[in-house]
Image: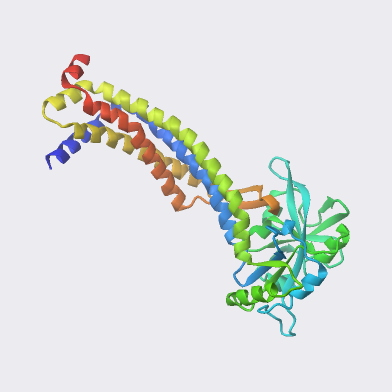
Amino acid sequence: MKMFRQIGAVTAMNFRSLPQRVSTSLVVVIGIAGVVAVLVSVLAMSTGLIRTMENTGRDDRAIVLRSGSMAETSSALDRNSAKLIVDGAGIKHDANGDPITSAETMRILSLHKKDDDSEINVILRGVGPRMLEVRPELKIVEGRMFEPAVTEVIVGKSAHSQFKGLNVGDVVHSRGANWTVVGVFETGGDSHESSLMTYAETLISIDQRGSFQSVTALLDSPSSFQAFKDSLSSNPALAVDVVREREYYQQQSKNMSTIISIIAYVVGGIMAVGAVFAALNTMYSAVSARLQEIATLRALGFGSAAMVASVLAEALILALIGGVIGALLAWMFFNGNTVSTSGGGMGQMVFELAVSPQLMILGVVWACVIGVLGGLFPAMRAARLPVAMALRAV
């Protein structure tokens, strides 16, 4: 109990002297706030990308690709395969008994971003005539749906907001065709809003190829997936992979989100090293300025544990203040901001930064670790300082 009273007394004395050391203390607070703000804002990209991809797809939809294909862009399904797939077990049928599926194809279009005019790649997805039944979440919010056999496209809401030349009535020029924008759609904020869509047969005809790249099937229920997969896997005329739509898009985002996270921790780590040295310098200065006070307290019987705890407590409090400020700044300036980045085989991906409570807590924890590391060695110096030497140093 005596030790705790000593720690409380010494710590209180430290904080009472903070106004005399406000400039050096601000160095620690501002430095750590910067570290946390950068770390949280960069990680918010990964969180936003994952959230967008997790919102893409449903458990009662399945995507069929050529066997061994990692993505739609590397897949190819001939027409005979596409016809066999729609006979799979577990597919939902309409009132007329027709299976609800969409055989799809993709190509890359070159567009320009609105903010800096940089050239980027955007997906043009060719979809089947039953696309609205397969994806009932797709809603036209401006203009109209494209017509079959005509070079018309609808554009996702996110693509419309980020890329040039995608207003209704604009013409997108590409190899082999000029595409007229006739509508803008939304799909609940998922990854499809970063793309353009047209009729698959029109796109195949222009590209002069006879194959699709995937087939998306609406299932009777999520539990029908295994029956659907087994029926296709057991068909000797097919060589395909079947995956739930939601799982497919989560896998597509995995590599990109991992890269973003690595960048965040590398950049944050480098900045954290600088913040640690700033904290070390500040706390060493604080200890040096209080040598006489420390020596007097030690002569009065205060233990080394009280010295260590008081210095660490000061460093931790300064770090905590900086961490909270940094996390709040990241939330205020970055949460909800729309950005776009390359989605690998999925073209340019538009999504919102997401500064989640978990990220803010992570940033504060990161700050506390920096504070402890920055205060540890000055605290040990204060504890080990001989009383006589401290008094002579004054």
Q: Nearer the viewer, residue 26 or 208?
A: 208
Residue 353 image offset from top left, x and y in percent: 56, 50
Can I make out residue 328 in this image? yes
From the viewer's side, name the closer residue of 259 and 67: 67
| Colour mode of the rendering | rainbow
**Image vertical order of residue 4 relative to residue 294, above or below:** below
In the rendered view, does 17 fall on the left or right side of 35?
left
Residue pushed farthest bottom? 96
Residue at the image position 63 percent from the left and 77 percent from the top: 227
* Closer to the camera in the image, 304 or 118: 304
Residue at (78%, 57%) from the top-left corner? 168
Q: Is residue 288 left or right of residue 140?
A: left
Quarter location, residue 295: top left
Indicate the position of residue 16 as horizontal and vertical percent values: 24, 31
Quarter-of-image position of residue 149 = bottom right
- Residue farthest to the front? 236
Q: Residue at x 79, y 60 (%)?
A: 153
On the image, the x and y values in percent for residue 278 come to 40, 28
- Label total for image: 0
Q: Is residue 144 shown to the viewer in this render?
A: no
- Residue 220 in the image: above or below residue 135: below
Quarter of the image for the N terminus: give it.
top left
Name the residue rendered at 61%, 77% in the picture.
224
Left or right, residue 23 beside residue 256: left
Residue 280 locus on image (x, y percent): 36, 28
Q: Quadrant of the C terminus?
A: top left
